[in-house]
Amino acid sequence: MRFAPGDFQSGKNEATNDLVVIALGAPRDSEDVRIPFACPTCDHDGLRIDPSENVTLVCPDCGDEHVPRACPDCGHDDLRAALSECAQPIVVCSNCRAEFESPPLQT
């Protein structure tokens, strides 16, 4: 597949077999970075990271903004997106290693 510059690409393997993907030529300086977590408002399957002073997750579908909060277990604010052992997206606290199925968000 080929995508034009500026086109956002995403995919999902709905098969039971593993999928291997190689991305070539992906620009490193893209400002459209997304994480594979559903929007709490509309359930769209990817949130865009707005790298402003206070990182905000923005839904590209409904436009709602969601502000991450610190780890509910230890209060540390360094949370990272990762893959679980069964290859599902999770959020992991870099301090206490607590895992969450979706990003903890401020209400």
Image: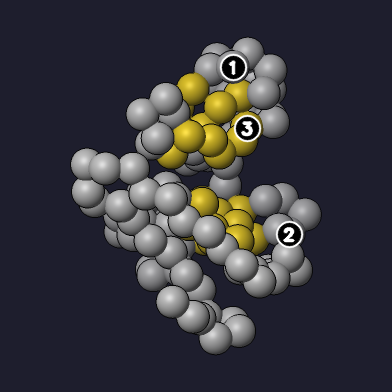
- Judging by the rendered image, the residue that carries numbered circle 2 is 52
Image height of 24 relative to 17, above or below: below
Q: Earlier in the sequence, mark 3 or mark 2?
A: 2
Q: CA distance from mark 2 to mark 1?
A: 26 Å
- Judging by the rendered image, the residue that carries numbered circle 1 is 97
Q: Secondary structure at mark 3?
A: strand
User: Where residue 94 sits in the image (x, y, percent)?
Assistant: 67, 23
Q: Quadrant of residue 76?
A: top right
Q: Earlier in the sequence, mark 2 or mark 1?
A: 2
- Judging by the rendered image, the residue that carries numbered circle 3 is 79
Front of the two marks 3 and 2 = 3
Q: Earlier in the sequence, mark 1 or mark 3?
A: 3
Front of the two marks 2 and 1 = 1
Q: CA distance from mark 3 to mark 2?
A: 17 Å
| Amino acid type for the residue under numbered disc 2 | Ser
Q: Quadrant of residue 25?
A: bottom right
